[in-house]
Amino acid sequence: MSDGVALVTGASRGIGRAIAVELASTGRPVALNYASREDDAKEAVAAVERAGGEAIAVRADVARPDDVARMFSDVEDAFGPVAVLVNNAGIRADGLALRMSEDAWDRVLRTNLNGTFWCCKRALRSMLRARFGRIVNVASIAGLHGSPGQANYAAAKAGVIALTKTLAREVGSRGITVNAVAPGLIATELTESLSEQQWDQLVSSVPQGRAGAPEDVARVVSWLCSPAGDYVNGSVYVIDGGMTA
Ligand code: NAP
C-alpha cells in the first residue's frame, strides 16, 4: 500500500465517520471533513484515535470550490498529499418533483454532485503527480433506479456515478482508480426522519431483513482502497442487502 493521507468528506457522523475509522485501521492518517458540527467532528476524530489511528478534522463546505481548495491545503500541510479521497458528504431535501423548490434542487445538486466534482478535481492534481490515487464516491441506489420524492437526490447520485466512470477512464492509465458505492437503506441521521411506517416498509423490502449499518459500507470502501482493489476501476458496488436485486 502506498503512503499518504486519506480524506473523507462528511465524516463527522454516519457513514463517513465509519469509513474514517475503517481507513485509519489500515495505518493511514485520516482527515475528517465536516460542514458545521464541530463537536461531532471532534468526537469522530477521538473515535479514530481510540482505534489507534491518527486524524484531524477539517471544516469546509464541499459545495464551495474556495473552501475545498483551503481544505486540501490544510490537509497537505498536516499530512502531505491526499492519496485516498472518499467523497461521502451528502444531504437530502425530499419532495415530489412538481412541488420541489429551486432551493431544494440546487442545494442537493451543489453538495452531492458539485462537491464531489470539486474534491475529485483538486485531489487529482497531486494523485497524477504521484501516479497513485484511490477515489471512492458514495452514490446511492437512488442514482441507479430513481427514487420517488427524491428527484434532486437521485439526479445528483446518478451524476456522481457518471462522473465516477468518466474519471476512471480519464485517469486509469496513471495508477489512479475511481469507483463508487451505492448504499441502500443505512441507519444514520440521514434516514432518521423516515416515519416508522416508511422505515418498516423499506426494511421489509430487504432480503436480508435489516437495514445496513455504516460499517457495512465502510468495509467495502476500505477494500476498494486496499491492494485487493487494485484492478477495480469505474465500478459501482451496490451495498443494499439485496434490496434492488
Ligand atoms: P449523515 O449522517 O446525515 O451525515 C452527513 C455528513 O455530511 C455529515 O458529516 C455532514 O457534516 C456532512 N455534510 C453535509 N453537507 C456538507 C457539505 N456541504 N460539506 C461538507 N460536509 C457536509 O448522512 P449519511 O447517511 O452518513 O450519508 C453519507 C453519504 O451516504 C451521503 O452521500 C448519502 O447520500 C449517502 N447514502 C446514505 C444512505 C443512507 O441510507 N443513510 C443511503 C445511500 C447513500 P456536518 O454534520 O458537519 O454538517
Image (spheres, rainbow, N blue to C red):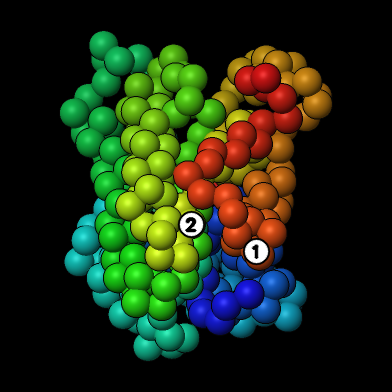
Quadrant containing the N terminus is bottom right
> Foreground: 221 or 184?
221
At x 58%, y 50%, the residue is 232
Q: Which callout, 1 or 2, points at the residue further toward the start of the chain?
A: 2
The tag on residue 150 is none
Q: Left of 119 or right of it: where is 143?
A: right
Crowdedness near tag 2: few (<14), some (14–19) or many (≥20) residues, C-alpha within 10 Å: many
x, y percentage for residue 191?
Answer: 57, 34
Quarter the C terminus occupies: top right
Quarter holding residue 125? bottom left
Looking at the image, residue 2 lies above or below residue 67: below
> Where does label 1 land, which residue?
226
Q: Is residue 205 above or below residue 62?
A: above
Q: Residues within 10 Å of mark 1 (few under 14, many from 20)?
A: some
Residue 150 in the figure: left or right of residue 121: right
* Residue indicated by mark 2: 177
Look at 78% across and 20% down and name the residue there.
207
Residue extending furthest front?
173
Identify which amino acid the numbered label 1 is placed on: Ser
Percent position of residue 135, x then y: 47, 58
Question: Are discs 1 and 2 less than 8 Å apart at CB?
Answer: no
